[in-house]
Image (spheres, rainbow, N blue to C red):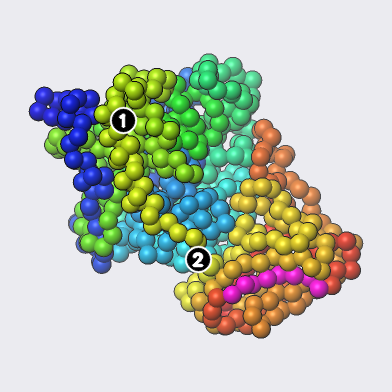
Amino acid sequence: MDAAGNSLFSGPRVYRKLLALLWPVLLLTGPEARAAGSPNIILIMSDDQGWGDFSLNGNKNLQTPNIDRLAQSGAVFSHFYVSPVCSPTRAELLTGRYHTRAGVYSTSQGGERLNLDETTFADIFKRAGYATAAFGKWHSGMQYPYHPNARGFDEFYGFCSGHWGDYFDPLLEHNGEIVQGKGFITDLLTDKALDYIDRHKDKPFFVYLPYNAPHSPMQVPDKWWDKFSNRELKMRADERYTEDPAFTKAALAMCENIDWNVGRIQDKIRELALEEETIIIYLNDNGPNSFRWNGGMKGRKGSTDEGGVRSPLIVSWAGKITAGLQIDEIAAVVDLFPSLADLAGITLRPAKRLDGISLKPLLFQTAESRDERIVFSHWNGRTSARTQKYRLDHEGGLFDMENDPGQLNDISSFEAEVTALLKTAVKNWEADALSVQAADNRPFPVGHPDFSYTQLPARDATEHGQIKRSNKFPNSSFFTNWTSTLDKITWDIEVLAEGTYEVRIYYSCPGDQLGSLVRLTFGNDRLSSRLSVANDVPLRGMEHDRVNRQESYVKDFKALTLGTIPLKKGKGQLFLDAPEIPGNCVMDFKELVLIRKP
């Protein structure tokens, strides 16, 4: 702002130097110092919930009383921005850096992994003496040291994939070991978080609760669905878009279930009398996963327009943050890393430049006037820039977001100076933030000395020959049509610790197709075993779907131990093939698990 209170982007002073504003410098390294009386932190993030999927934002189609109450008890950022899709937002949340710097370029097959030289907020809180746990969808790497247990979390319960195939009694993992869950997944994840809070109530804890709802497949218990199944939608998607009412109803039912679980978290904190010692944060990871009411904004999940990247941010801390505080300054998911450290009194040491800035001055209402800020959104070759007043879209259109929040009128020809300024800012940002991207030659690590389990799912593998993936979306898929001795499944791996590994596969095979000789090979090491146990199970998941899904259906894949294989350290190709196939097919294959023996 200038002395008269005018925006830098709305008057003749548009050529003020901006580049120094693009990347605030806040750096970290070494052991952090924890201040006395550090607050507990509970960070809740939903998956594919839109800005409009809350009654607090005016949606009359549903009620979210617990999240509304959380907002009333603390601060709400009205213009808060995340990435257009799942894994980039998680990377930016975890590191405080734009996802392009952290090695994240896709949502599957290894492209979702954070580079190993990145530091996460869990790393710094763990070093500061916190108990740290994550319950839910990780989506930032599966194999240790990409696994959450290697990224600062003492405990992890959930799944590392980008989405899951069935939300009822799901097969999940606990600290790397595959386990059978009981119940609806959002309720189950909350149960685990509540138990962890109970067990760690006497020391500072950081609980990260990344729900996977309302991401598809659209599954929700009858209690929530029945409320919506025959309800008329009072508020609909922007008229520019076509809405699927059944999908909307399922999403809103899942959102109400999330709200109920947020209420359970709040109740637990009250029960333990920890309100004044606990910060609770709530946000979404991207825009809505369908066209439904979203405040008239343009775009949805996957878009760099307003509707694809705007999320509520709620921060509640009883006795510290003014109840009902609304903050209109723009902020972004990269800000949460430095903000949480600042709120907890953790001093960050120099090492890597952060893109985020601390929001503590805004939350504590001590912020002084500051220069105009630009927040960048990037995905799939498209970059958009947001200031307090304007958005420059990925095609170079300029929109006055104060007077045209739906991005209906391109004013780039009328505001040529502002447009030129923001185009230059985008060009410079891309030159810096995209320059670090390179061809991904990171192998999948196997057998880290600090971790017993390595999961190698079909998602991360390459199929050869006649083998087919069960769905075009690799996450939560499996391989089928394995019919030829020339077919094989491969992974590019690096064995980190030489040793003997127990080999398990998760598979299905009808009894009349048993007998194939399955062979696992890495270099000169080999294990062969015949499939001798039937697991003839049908596709399922559709029985729980409220609308037809795009993703793969699932099976009740069974674990079968093939034996043990010695593996030497080094890089190479691990492959699974079948040199003998007495029937018409080998099996349907879901996952390979390697367990390093003592």
SS assignment at label 2 = loop
Q: Residue at x 18, y 40 (%)?
A: 17
Q: Which mark is residue 156?
A: none
In front here: 69 or 209?
A: 209
Please count the marks in the image: 2
Question: Which residue is at 31% across, 58% downward?
Answer: 125
Amino acid type, label 2: Arg
Q: CA distance from mark 1 to mark 2?
A: 39 Å
Give the x, y percent position of residue 37.
22, 53
Identify whether 375 is placed above or below 563.
above
Q: Closest to the observer: 366 or 199? A: 366
Residue type, label 1 = Thr
Task: Determine the image quadrant of residue 512.
Answer: bottom right
Residue 308 in sight in this render = yes
Which residue position is annotated with label 1?
A: 419
Residue found 62% across the figure and 67% down from its top: 491
Q: Quadrant of the N terminus?
A: top left
Residue 319 shows up from this direction: no
Q: Is residue 118 left or right of residue 38?
A: right
| Of residues 2 and 439, the one drawn nearer to the viewer in this rendering | 439
Q: Give the magenta part as a residue range.
A: 572-579
Q: Is residue 386 above or below residue 241?
A: below
Which residue position is annotated with label 2? 442
Q: Position of residue 100 (x, y in %)?
A: 41, 52
Mark 1 Cα-neighbour bin, 10 Å: few <14, some 14–19, many ≥20? many
Name the residue nearer the viewer: 545 or 489. Answer: 489
Residue 267 vertical placement versus 517 (above, below): above
Asked which quadrant contains residue 495, the reply is bottom right
* Mark 2 Cα-neighbour bin, 10 Å: few <14, some 14–19, many ≥20: some
Magenta includes 325?
no
Identify the main secondary structure in magenta.
strand
Q: Residue at x 72, y 40 (%)?
A: 542
